[in-house]
Image (cartoon, helix red, strand yellow):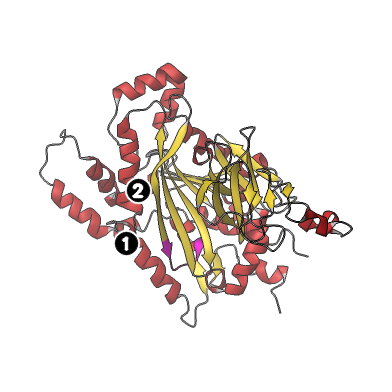
Amino acid sequence: MAPTRNDILALVQEDRVHRDLYLSEELFRLEQRHFFANTWNFVGHASQVPNPGDYVAVEIAGQPLLMVRQPDASIRVLNNRCAHKGMPLATDACGSTGKFFRCPYHAWTYKLDGSPLAIPIKNGYEGTRLKECASGQGMGALANVEVYRDFVFAKVNEGGPDFRSYFGDVLGAIDNLVDRSPTGKLKVEGGILRNVIHCNWKMYLENINDTVHPQSAHESATAAANILWQGKPVDEPKPMAMEQILPFGAGYDFFDRMGGRVYPNGHSMLGVNFSIHSGYAQVPEYEAALVAAHGAERTAEILQRSPQNSVCFPSLSVKSSPQAIRVIRPLAAERTLIEAWSFRAEGAPDVLFERSMTYNRLVFSPMSVVAHDDVHLFESIQEGLKAGRNEWISLHRDFDPAELEGGTREVNGTSELLMRNQFRAWAQYMTADMA
């Protein structure tokens, strides 16, 4: 018997969650149908589809979709299937379809907005019910699509909160990232690092807000970096990789004082006071360009705010400095695709793009000195959760009954409220359309 609404709600308690959230394939299938379909998920970036007919293929809520640039320069998200027999209209990860989509099976064609264009031997359908049913209506497009500062989001299901109500103030993290360009424009460049990890997607997402693990999980990497830099003059400029890796070894007090903030619907910002990105070398000519574009006050606000991670729940994590994002794409209960993207800020010096690329390779590449620690831990935890006796995952640290009232709250940087907030949102949207 499928879990009921009450069964699912019982898996998320005020200070712990049940291991089925990580292990159950049945629950994952329900997530695709309910949770991911009810939430706003990141699709892609407008710079990936510069010309009409350009597309990017993605999967959201278990559904194959296409982000497509339209002739009027707008962006639509279409179902990637022919209305006839179900053949995907695009089988590459990205590309250009030209002026229309053509099915390779029976040559049904569709306009770039997904509407029907032509059908071979059309007279064979005269007098039938084709035009009256879904097969005659075209590919189908999602109604809930929002392009926010070139970041494209979509919600599969109808109903529920609109885009701005869902994300609220956490959209400021995207603003801070985009405004680091003097022209307010970003471009995806340098390729996307992809890594399939054999763990549940929630495990990775909660780790984004975990500041207690670096001291132990990444001890060997930071110890090696410290040895290499030992004895250098205090004022000697650090190589970029050293500048980025050394802060991982900061103590518990550093991470606790960096602070955090939780928002409704599972969103969060870690490092509201400062972060491991706050000490990067200044670039005077870049700062002058920002002042010319935004004014001194806004420039100071942009550059002084370098949060560790901002989570646009459930699929996007933003690092405004070093201008990088991670996209979480669930594949199965025990399999998750993680993407690390780098952005080039238009009008900014090349060193900023180099910083983004270096950070992603150093920290998020599966062969990096940091990510292999995390991947080993995630995949080991996925197996360890199958052990008997204890079926629960502890999220007790800094629990306060007052937090159950919800809303936006300031927290210390090591608080597990950052994680509890995600699971409460999961329970809310997982059951939103269940009787």
Q: Is residue 421 visible?
A: no
Q: CA distance from mark 1 to mark 2?
A: 13 Å
Give whichever of 67, 280 is nearer the camera. Answer: 67
Give whichever of 4, 187 is nearer the camera. Answer: 187
Horizontal and vertical percent position of residue 400: 55, 55
Question: How many residues crowd mark 1 within 10 Å: few (<14), some (14–19), many (20+)?
Answer: some
| Image quarter of the N terminus | bottom right
Residue at the spot 20% in from the left edge and 40% down from the top edge: 239
Q: In the rendered view, does 376 fall on the left or right side of 41?
A: left
Residue that sits furthest to the left in the current view: 231
The residue beneath circle 2 is 360
Horizontal and vertical percent position of residue 63: 62, 59
| Above or below, 231 relative to 65 | above
Residue 419's mark? none
Q: How many marks?
A: 2
Inspect the magenta stretch and tell me whether residue 238 lies in it: no
Give whichever of 417, 192 is nearer the camera. Answer: 192
Q: In the rendered view, does 12 fall on the left or right side of 175?
A: right
The residue beneath circle 1 is 372
The image quadrant of residue 280 is top left
Magenta-colored span: 196-202
Horizontal and vertical percent position of residue 301: 44, 27
Question: How many residues crowd mark 2 within 10 Å: few (<14), some (14–19), many (20+)?
Answer: many
Amino acid identity at mark 1 = His
| Above or below, 15 relative to 304 | below
Amino acid identity at mark 2 = Asn
Q: Secondary structure at mark 2?
A: helix
